[in-house]
Amino acid sequence: MSKFVMRVATALFAALAFGFVAVPLASAQEAPAETEFEAAWSYTIESSCAGWEGVIRQGANYWGGASEGGGTPVRCQNSAITDCGFFAEGVETTDVHGNLIVVGCNYGMGQLIKLYPGAVNDPALLAAHEFGHNWYGHSYNGCASWASPTDVMATTMC
């Protein structure tokens, strides 16, 4: 083969390899508005969440396309989440003593969600944040809010 063909082939393969390596995971800045998310997904609210079902549904519905039954199990507890782990996506708040505690965790991008809804002012926002981790990482260090998908995916429930 000619040198020109070899150079073109090398450049093409390098560009393809770079494209596969450099493709980033979706960030919360790329998260769609609540009505734009069309992919079908599902969740199951476990009995430990009795009394919190409405706010959990509200949080799930933020992302659209959700149906209840099957899919991601959602478990609630009345204490800080202590087993979130390094690779899981946890969200934190401060307790009455000013200590940071983990109040929500999404294990394995939708394998299990744990919530401590009684510890936050807006448990629906907490649920929306954790459901968002089925697709997105944290957006920034700061207070979560309903202002945008980026704000929903902030790291702290204030």
Image: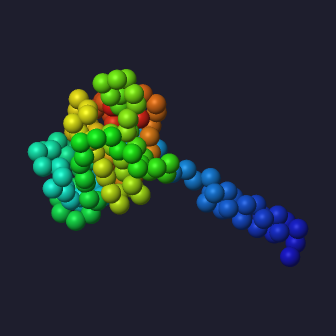
Left/right of residue 121 with respect to residue 82 in the rendered view: left
Q: Name the spot of residue 12 as percent of width and height, x first.
A: 71, 63
Work out whether residue 31 or residue 90 is closer to the camera in this orientation and state it: 90
Q: Name the spot of residue 83 as percent of width and height, x first.
A: 41, 50
Left/right of residue 41 with respect to residue 55 in the rendered view: right
Query: Going 78% across and 65% down the picture, which residue do you hit?
Result: 10
Residue 6 lies in what quarter of the image?
A: bottom right
Query: Going 57% across and 53% down the picture, which residue do you hit?
Result: 23
Quadrant containing the C terminus in the rendered view: top left
Quadrant containing the N terminus in the rendered view: bottom right
**Residue 33 visible at all:** no
Residue 137 lies in what quarter of the image?
A: top left
Which residue is the extreme one toward the right? 3
Which residue is the extreme one toward the bottom? 1
Left/right of residue 25 with respect to residue 123 in the rendered view: right
**Residue 7 visible at all:** yes
Q: Name the spot of residue 65 as percent of width and height, x first.
A: 24, 55
7 w.r.t. 158: above or below:
below
Left/right of residue 43 with respect to residue 28 in the rendered view: left
Work out whether residue 82 or residue 37 is closer to the camera in this orientation and state it: 82
How is this picture coloured? rainbow
28 w.r.t. 146: above or below:
below
115 w.r.t. 16: above or below:
above
Q: Name the spot of residue 97 as percent of width and height, x first.
A: 34, 23
Query: Going 45% across and 37% down the picture, which residue do you hit?
Result: 139
Query: Going 63% across and 57% down the picture, which residue do you hit?
Result: 21
Work out whether residue 151 or residue 54 is closer to the camera in this orientation and state it: 54
Q: How many marks?
A: 0
